[in-house]
Amino acid sequence: MDFLDGLKWQADHAATGAMAIHLAMHEIYDVVLLDLNLPDIDGLEVCRTIKAQAPRNVPVLMLTARDAFEDKARGFHGGADDYLTKPFDLRELALRCEALARRGQLHIGQEMRVGPLSLHAREKRASHNGTPVALTQACFKVLFMLCTAHPHAVSRSALMHELWGADPPDSDALKSHIYALRKQLEQAGAPNMIATIPHLGYRLALAAADDV
């Protein structure tokens, strides 16, 4: 954790497999570092659960002392994107994390479609049923995260980190951006598209016919 903090990366720590799964379901990560030796759940099962249920396809880097080929094969077959055996050089860990994060961004693609919404990541523009949505840069980031996570919710903490990094302002600033995004979507013919999830955050609220 100290090494990652020194690289100016924001890292969450889960001491158990159950906590790792919980965080992966409710937060948005660029990379998951997964130790196979967990006290409650086998790391391979944690990896399978994250890959099957997380709101986006987050890259998983397995860390373990199991260095036999059979162990590595089980790791990759269990959904791991990369595998690093102990002991390892922390500089190599950083390089692998950076490579996996870049790969994860490539999977997003240039255009994302969620129901009637279409987002173009590079141009930072969006449309609703073909009608352009006039978005500020901050509102586009929020909408992009909500679309990426759909149908799951995105936590307030994940949204605040995306907008302001490790030094966010008070929560009223996020509420202001959510309000502005709702108004911008409403003007494009998409009212009530962002639902508030109490004690968690926000998610897209699409009609059943649009939720494809």
Image: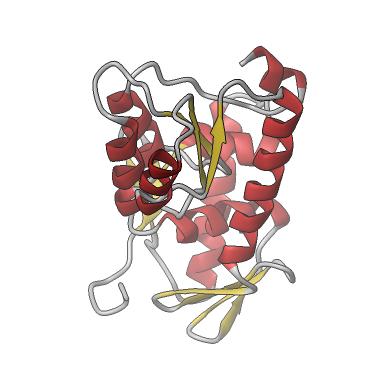
Residue 26 appears in the figure: yes
Q: Is 169 located above or below residue 179 in the figure?
A: above
Q: Is 12 located above or below residue 144 in the figure?
A: above
Percent of width and height locating residue 119: 58, 72
Which quarter of the rendered picture does the N terminus lie within? top right
Which picture quadrant has residue 116? bottom left
- In front of the other: 90 or 50: 90
Residue at horizontal 27 percent and vertical 38 percent from the top: 45
From the viewer's perspective, tell me whether residue 195 is left or right of residue 185: left
Percent of width and height locating residue 2: 67, 12
From the viewer's perspective, tell me whether residue 126 is left or right of residue 206: right
Return the residue found at the far top.
2
Residue 195 appears in the figure: no
Which quarter of the rendered picture does the C terminus lie within? bottom left
Residue at horizontal 69 percent and vertical 48 percent from the top: 99
Q: Is 127 located above or below residue 70 in the figure?
A: below
Residue at horizontal 51 percent and vertical 66 percent from the top: 185
- In front of the other: 22 or 44: 44
Q: Is 75 located above or below residue 172 in the figure?
A: below
Q: How many marks?
A: 0
From the viewer's perspective, tell me whether residue 86 is left or right of residue 25: right
Percent of width and height locating residue 23: 39, 32
Percent of width and height locating residue 107: 57, 64
Q: How is the image coloured?
A: secondary structure
- In front of the other: 173 or 162: 162
- In front of the other: 33 or 153: 33
